[in-house]
Amino acid sequence: MATSAERQTGGSVRVTLWILLIVYIFNFIDRQIVNILAEPIRMELGLSDTQIGLMTGLAFALFYTVLGLPIARFSDRSTTNRPWLIGGALAIWSAMTALCGLAQNFAQLLLARIGVGVGEAGCTPPAHSLIADLVEPSKRASALAFYALGIPVGTLLGMFIGGLLADAVGWRNAFLIVGLPGLILAIIVFTTLKDPRRTGLVKQTAAQASAGQMPLKDALRAMFSSRAFVLLVIAGSAAAFLGYGKITWITIFFQRTHGLTPGETGFWFGVVNGGAGIAGTMLGGYIADRYGAKNRRHVLTAPALGMVLTIPFALWAFMTDNWFLALFLLIIPTLCNSLYYGPTYSSVQGLVPLRARAIAAAVLLFFQNLIGLGLGPLFFGMLSDMLQPAYGEESVRYVLYGATFLGLVPAFFFWRCSLRLDEELDRKD
């Protein structure tokens, strides 16, 4: 029977996880709303598809990734108050999201999106570090999958709310209305969350407690001496490249090829993408914890198989001229592509020493977001511009055909990484 202290500790962990989830939902609402607003922005400001890719991807990702590493180093310091770091980051990115609605030209919008990236750089590395400190390794994949629900839920809400607001009050007001509530949430984070390093909830040995921060050179050596970590970074980056690239251009595909409005696209694709993403994220964490406990290799089995299973369904979805059938067919690819979140992030936390967890999360996010978010939308946008002379408005459809087959790349590297997990996972705590 649990003692009063144990129940209180468990309650504190649950409160922390829920607040971090809500923060991450806001993170992805503000990050992804630009995708559903991209087409009306393009028409008003006269942008090319390459500029759309730059605005939705690289402008955000470049500063997000570069700043993520020093912020993670700061987060790994034993004196850092991680909830205050997260709350301050939330306030910055929310204010910059609102400023996107005031942009009068492409340069101003680009600068505002850079500001969003600057703020969001301070969210996930300290959040992952907090969760890893609070949750025992056997439940880490499920806990990080719970946090990762912010991705599909935030994406769903960003599309749904952004699309409705774009139809009702225009894209400028949509940015303003979505951005400002984050400032209120930041106050809640400041006043509610406590750093477990300051409350005694982190269970460390005397040596760990007195060791201080691991030198950056040692932390990087520990990370990149792990073959599993390197393979996981490659797999996660390839998955993010396809995920971020496809979600931007699928929303444009439904508007440009099938003639849906931003509101219609936001509702229908938001429900399908968000619902399937939520199911896939939770299922991926559950499978990793359950079957990974029996054989560590199975922590990454579902992500590897899922990336392969998406291909026929995605191809059919992009081939059909029936937009409703296309939405229905995308349920399976979205679910399967979401299986990797919890297993990937939990494996990273288990492949590095305790004092390098935040920087390890930041290194993974650096590559995922620079390659995935930064280059995915931009690459597909440039490819669409190249194909437009031959295919016109249908160029996006052909870009998505090619993106579908590229899913074999992360599948291969997830499988290769899984072969190393039994030897390397959770040997360094």
Image (cartoon, rainbow, N blue to C red):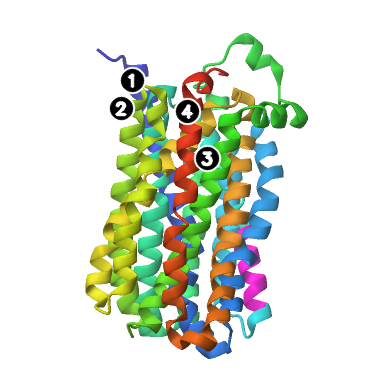
Helix, strand or loop under label 2? helix
Q: Name the residue under label 1.
A: 294
Q: Where is residue 94 in the image (x, y as percent from the top left)?
A: 54, 62
**In percent of the image, x 61 and y 78: which residue is there?**
51
Above or below: residue 285 compared with residue 170: above
**In percent of the image, x 52 and y 17: which residue is there?**
203
Magenta region, mostly helix, strand or loop? helix
Q: Mark 3 points at which residue?
A: 127
Given this view, does label 3 or label 2 mark the residue nearer the observer? 2
Q: In which quarter of the image is residue 126?
A: top right
Q: Earlier in the sequence, mark 1 or mark 4?
A: 1
| Quadrant in which the N terminus is drawn | top left
Q: Which of marks 3 and 2 is nearer the N terminus?
A: 3
Q: Are marks 3 and 2 in contact (CB under 8 Å)?
A: no
Q: Mark 4 points at which residue?
A: 419
Neighbours of disc 2 within 10 Å: few (<14), some (14-19), many (20+): some
Q: Are marks 2 and 1 in contact (CB under 8 Å)?
A: yes
> Does 118 sit left or right of 346 as displayed?
right
Q: Are marks 3 and 4 in contact (CB under 8 Å)?
A: no
Q: Where is residue 273 in the image (x, y as percent from the top left)?
A: 33, 61
Above or below: residue 393 compared with residue 238: below
Residue 186 highlighted magenta (yes or no): no
Helix, strand or loop under label 3? helix
Q: Are marks 1 and 4 in contact (CB under 8 Å)?
A: no
